[in-house]
Image (tube, grey):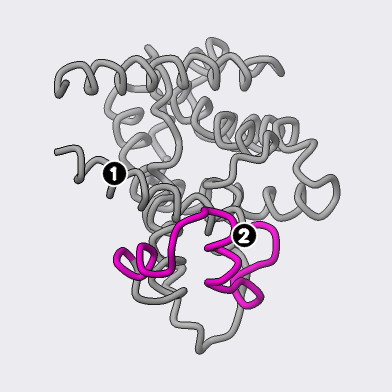
Amino acid sequence: MAQQERAIRTRQKIVKAAAELFDEVGYEAATISEVLKKCGVTKGALYFHFSSKEELAQEVLAAQVSALPPVPPQELFLQQSLDEALLLAHMLRLGDPMVRGSIRLTVDQGSPLDGLDRRVPMQGWINHNMDVLARAKAAGELLPHVDVASTATLFTSSFTGVQVLSKIMTGHADMVERVLDLMGNLIAAIAVPGVLLRLDFSRDRAEQVYEEAVRLRDERLAAEAAATA
């Protein structure tokens, strides 16, 4: 069991170091030797887990959605959707390595021959948004004309564009404000008026959601560790 836990920790350390490097220099310029310097593991340990830079990058891409701690449960599904967008925005502003590294990999066009499947995280977000919006519609939070599938795609593509703009203009310093503007306009077009009035679009909500999400995640991890001790 101890050996298995060490292997898991080593793998996580490698992935985090790779994400940091991809955020700093992009996929094309990143090298395995630089990943090794960042994470401090042997070449043999890295290649035990990953056979190539491409496989390592694909792992970072696949971890994009799961890198976010789950937001605290909310009475309204649209508030959950808003909170998830604010959480991601806040983590980008903070410079979270997994989030920023995976998102840079996603939006960088790179070479058509680099072998990366950038559809994985995008489709993951579309599917997730579709699920939350479907629940919102079933709960009567959305206007009757709203198409869940197209709206989920719009949410995902719009956030991607806002992220790129914020990165270019301010290095993500204004990411939360831009996402508040984005979500305010998107949700206003789909929400039942009575529901819209109940949503919290306050500027400090992003940090509050982040702190609560991290607390809940840490409590869950501590409970899991205690159960296996």
Residue 25: say if magenta: yes
The N terminus: image quadrant? top left
Which label lies toward us, 2 or 1? Answer: 1
Q: Label 1 is placed on what type of residue? A: Arg
Find residue 21 and name its label. 2
Residue at image location 55% in from the left, 46% down from the top: 99
Q: Is residue 33 a member of the stretch shown in magenta?
A: yes
Packing grade of label 1 (10 A; few <14, some 14-19, many >=20) is few
Region of the chain picked out in magenta, as a range: 23-49
Task: Kindly identify the amino acid type of the residue bearing the numbered disc 2.
Answer: Leu
Q: Residues within 10 Å of mark 2 (few under 14, many from 20)?
A: many
**Sequence-first tag of 2 and 1:** 1
C-alpha span from label 2 to label 1: 23 Å
Residue 88 visible from this viewpoint: yes
Query: To which residue does mark 1 refer?
Result: 6
Q: Label 1 near label 2: C-beta < 8 Å?
A: no
Q: Secondary structure at mark 2?
A: helix
Secondary structure beneath disc 1?
A: helix
In the figure, 73 relative to 116: above or below? Answer: above
| Residue 131 occupies quadrant | top left
